Image (cartoon, grey):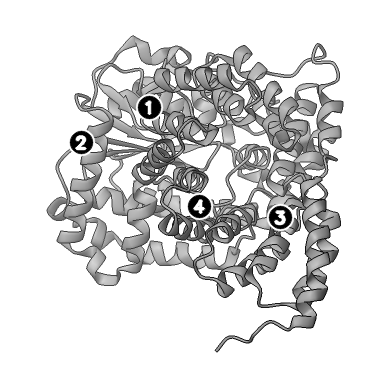
Amino acid sequence: MSQSPDPAATQQVAPLLALATELLRAGRPADALAPLRDAALLQPSDPIIQHDLGLACLEAGLVPDAITALQRAVAGNPRYTDAYLRLGIALEKAGDIGGAIAAYDRATELLPSLTEAWFRAGALAHTLGHRDEAIDCFRRASATGGTTSFARLGKARALLAEDRNREAEQVLRHTLALDPKNAMAHDLLGNLLSEFGRFDEARECFRRAIEIAPLLAGSYYELTRCRPITSSDDGLLQQMETALATPGLEASQRLRIHLAIGKAAEDLGDYALAMQHFDAADAVRQGSAPFDAAAFSAEIDRLIARCSPQWIARARELGSDDAKPVLIIGMPRSGTTLVEQIVSMHPEVGAGGELHFWNQRGAQWRHSGTSGKKAPFLTQAAEDYLGLLRAIAPKAARVTDKMPFNFLWAGLIHVVFPRATIIHCRRAAVDTALSIHQTHFHPSVAFPTGGTELVGYIRCCQRLTDHWRSVLPVDRFLEVDYEDLAREPEPVIRRIIAACGLAWHDACLRPESNPRAVRTPSKWQARQPIYRTSVARWRRYEPWLGPLRALVNDEPEWNAGRP
């Protein structure tokens, strides 16, 4: 039975709420905290007070306090739609993607016309690789939002997820014609343009997004990756360093600015400053997305034990005979994008990009015990994956999947598809680690980006790929060294195309001409002819490598001692 409000407390609360409302309307959420906290002490079970306190904390950048207050609000009123929406936003800022999606789902269940919740849920589903779910959420945002910005952006994002890029560009440009100060539209358009190599236009979009909304300062990360920064970019470094001090800047945006400053400093030859900011970005990430190195090592042990030579040998009796899949695997930043650009230049190949299928199906298999080794599970996986590949490129003889983390599931993939080509991209471990250290990865990816944890992660991955090398047929598990590919491209490219069971085509020698969208951090690099300047990059950073120095001895033998 709920307790009746104390009349005396109610009388005390009224002026506190009036003051807080005035301060919130004046854009002073930090000043509204004290009266709202006093009101919450007087009436702790009042969901409206808890909601307003949570909103003020959210706007003041006190995310953990916001989550606590908003959880109290929905506990006090389980049908409080606005509180669920703002709880989702707070959980999203804290990196709790699953919790945020659950909060948005509850908000739209209570109020199906809540456009912002549909849009935010779609963005998170897209981040997690749940394409169909994301499209559905964006379509609902578009349908419920009328002429609002969220509705137009929902339509654009649905089109982008469906690879209807030209239509998406038209919607974004129409949105900006109606609302020139829509920072999110500028940012989305910038990303779309950069994916297709239209870098000058993209840079202008990112600049406008940051000017309009300084809290989107993380867009500097994409801006600096549109081309190398030069001395002609006068003042850019200083602008980004100033942006770090923007009040209310989220940790995720701060992380991206550190990486952007590091990229610009590297381009300008200041490697000490660059590494200082790369290290700072890694420190931000560690604070929001800790990595359990011991658990990952144990998981590698289990994968090796489960994918025994005896089980791998059963691929011929259990697996599909379809040769359509071409899996391009390896550590992130090891050359997977370049290899996909090469293979997908072939007229008989469709490019799938980074598909999340095996990360999801592999997790089911991992938790399924012996049932995951039985024919029905494997047959269903084959059927579902082929359906996905055919939807991407219905007429292609081969379709690529360049999700790097599929290196975890190479054994499972081979048993399901014994005739699939698995291309393992390798690169000098210290160069791979350095490139990872300089790159933004979404916090939902359980993956270290620096320090001893990254060294340990790479060593675990080496241990697993050593196992795949020992148990998978040599004609199905092709290994490509980035250094060999950069040094003498043609023989390596011919070997790749032959391993895919395809006739030679000269177009594969020109991956920089590939017209497809590139949706990885390698957007600019993918548009350049194959080059060698990324080989042995670690030498520029030698005095500042820190724990990554442990990987220097893992360099390929031919590259040891070369500049």
Instruction: First in sequence, mark 2 or 4: give its number.
Output: 2
- Residue type, label 4: Cys
Tag nearer the camera, 1 or 2: 1
Residue annotated with mark 3: 58
Residue at 46% over, 60% down: 106
Q: CA distance from mark 2 to mark 4?
A: 26 Å
Left or right of 92? Residue 385 is left
Residue annotated with mark 4: 461
Tag nearer the camera, 4 or 1: 1
Residue at 45% over, 12% down: 513
The percent position of residue 44, horizontal first and vertical second, equals 71, 77
In this view of the protein, which residue sits in the foreground, 99 or 104?
104
- Residue type, label 1: Asp
Instruction: First in sequence, mark 3 or 1: give its number.
Output: 3
Q: Find numbered disc 1 in the image and state the secondary structure of the residue it sits on.
A: loop
Instruction: First in sequence, mark 2 or 3: give its number.
Output: 3
Tag nearer the camera, 4 or 3: 3
Q: CA distance from mark 4 to mark 3?
A: 39 Å
Q: Is residue 448 visible?
A: yes
The percent position of residue 556, horizontal first and vertical second, equals 57, 37
Instruction: Count neighbours of disc 1 (C-alpha within 10 A) and say few if under 14, some if 14 to 19, many if 20 or more.
Output: few
Residue annotated with mark 1: 163
